[in-house]
Amino acid sequence: MIRRSVLCRVLSGTIWILSTVSGFVLSAEPKFNRQISGRFSIESQWYPESAAHPDQRGHATGFVMEPELYLDSMESWSFTFAPFFRYDSADTRRTHADLKEAYLLLFGYVGNDEWELRLGIDRAFWGVAESRHLVNIVNQIDLVEHPYKELKLGQPMARLTWSGNWGMAEIFGLPYHRPRTFPGRTGRLRLPLVVDNDQVSYESAAGQWHLDLAARYSHIFGPFDIGISAFDGTSREPFLLPSTDFLGAPTLAPHYEQIRQFGLDTQLTAGSWLFKLEAIQRLDARDRLGRKVDYSASVIGGEYTFYSALGSNVDISLLGEWNSDGRGQYATNVFQKDLFVAARFALNDVRSTEILASILGDADSTSRVLAFELNRRLSDQWSLNMEAIAFLDIDQADISYEIRRDSFIDLNLIYNF
Amino acid sequence: MLPFFTLCLFILTCLCAEPVFSASPAPEETGLKIARDAHGRDEGFGNFTARQNMVLRNKHGQESRRQLRIKVLEVPEDGNKSLFVFDEPRDVRGTALLIHAHRESADDQWLYLPALKRVKRISSSNRSGSFMGSEFAYEDLTPQAVEKFTYRYLRDEPCGDLICTVSERVPVDRKSGYSRQVVWRDKEELRAWKVEYYDRKDSHLKTLTLGNYEQYLERFWRAAEMTMENHLTGKSTVLTWTDFQFRTDLDDRDFTQTGLRRVR
């Protein structure tokens, strides 16, 4: 029921934005630019191991539609509309729709400074690291899309950017909270109990309509890119409380609390080296046992690229990142004390073939996550994405223990238009 | 005896060398002068926008296309600022590359990835790598400051209906994929018509042929067609430039990171 009313609100908001924009379009010069683009993809996922939890399927097929409409005029405003729909044969919760983007963009100049205002639904990306996006807090994670890539849901926002020789400052007003998506009963990569998003609760009396605030300042000092950020509002990460569904079966109810987060992200670009650091301090959060904690977490690492390695056309990048979380074994994610090592091969061929092989290993246990990903263009419009992820020797104390049998192979055929 | 001979030899060398030097300058000086002149003739263009269309062909004749838009801003006393926006192939549509080139230090480069809405600062060490799988390397496409090579004048010879001056240039940057390049420029306008690229083993790797020159603002020459042939692989890339527009209203503000996120 809650979700239906949310959908209605999102839809009515969209219609409002559309009508505002069409007003703009009609009142503006008739000469405006329109682009329709997007992608359509067919996906097949295969889980070779038998499921750890009842009802989970071993195979899923589906498709994704991601069209995008873009309008602009006179280089002073633009409107972007990008809905998203996924159908998944195995999991009704992974079958989902989202509005990734639906925003009006206005920009201009004041002296040597530049301003930009985005109103509507958009996505913002903060950070520099590859193994995880620690400081990146504005948008909610669309967890059913991928277990650890941290793909994002659209977020209603008013975002003002002001930049000049002194750097770039951004402030966000985030009037609405999107709950994280979770797999359903028949889906893989889940906890023994299903998370019921019809039972979302909030610490704030305003519920999901609490106005969250976020800000970031960034600047370039020669080879250094430095960003500092702050967030005050509803946590994007839920604490999961035991509950029962309407049939009396045990389930998990997500509870979102008010937190504050301060973040730092920085990169040093020196020749073929990239050195990266992301760190956060989060206040009023919870640990795995549900205790209130203030904690800090960081990811530090680097990337070195051998361009045109061994006289060939291939670029080989080696990546290493060390993740740590002040909550230690009580951290609510896998990155409590973990080393990420990866190699990326960019073949620089006509088909832009790219291979990424990585391993994420826990320093205190045997747990390892192996990943292999291949991207290749098949023609000017078709491309292929293949991914294999293996969970190896997952320790019983590890937070990924419940998905230990969910190693999978994923094949994606994409049509770009 | 030996010091006497050495002295004689030294005096002889000086006597012989002296008039030669004053009569015609060293080939290194001539080469540098030609490069400076050619560069000087292109100064003051301000800015321009254009479209690039690439056809990549392998030795079996199979073709693949690239389409991009480019904006370039001249920065006095430093390297240019340029912005590449990809339109085709479709999977990289909307991807944009921002380059702030520098005369003395390493260039600054940022890549915008529209799928993640992420601006990534990237290394500029990738000089010799292929641009979009084509036969053009990054260093072939980015404008090169005079200081980034040493020069040597070789000879004059006819090239088509024109007389060309032929010079060799050696990249200073050790990350360059080339040991040397040989450039043919016509003596009248100093437009490049042909460049031969020699790899680090000094074998003849590629040849660039330029053509369909047009003059803009009654001063600046631009080749509309550039063909790069790779002699080792038999592959080639034809780069066609269209829609040149000079001195548009571009300025510094069109080459910022904030602007990069807005690029379409």
Image (cartoon, rainbow, N blue to C red):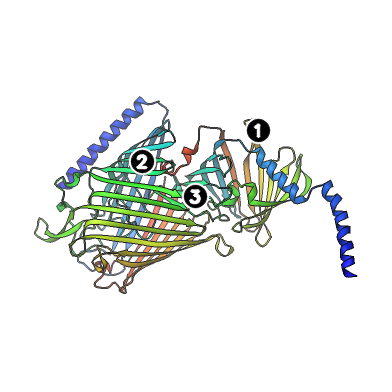
Q: Chain of mark 3?
A: B
In terms of image quadrants, where is residue A172?
top left
Amino acid of disc 1: Arg
Residue B133: x percent and y percent? 54, 53
Amino acid of disc 3: Gln
| Residue A346, placed above or below residue B20 | below
Left-right relation of B10 to A77: right
Determine if marks 1 and 2 fall on one subunit: no
| Residue A71, placed above or below residue A254 | above
Residue B127: x percent and y percent? 57, 54
Query: Which residue is painted at 48% across and 51% down in the image?
Result: A222
| Residue B250, placed above or below residue B28 | above
Is residue A141 something one can see in this rendering?
A: no
In 3D space, how far apart are the residues under numbered discs 1 and 2 (Cα atoms)?
40 Å
Which sits in the foreground, A111 or B65? A111
Tags 1 and 3 touching, CB below 8 Å: no
Q: Chain of mark 1?
A: B
Tags 3 and 2 touching, CB below 8 Å: no
User: What element does badge 1 sit on?
Assistant: loop
Amino acid of disc 2: Thr
Left-right relation of A159 to A206: right
In 3D space, how far apart are the residues under numbered discs 1 and 3 (Cα atoms)?
30 Å
For residue A161, the mark is: 2
Is residue A338 something one can see in this rendering?
A: yes
User: What element does badge 2 sit on?
Assistant: strand
* Residue for badge 1: B219
* Residue for badge 3: B109
Q: Earlier in the sequence, mark 1 or mark 3?
A: 3
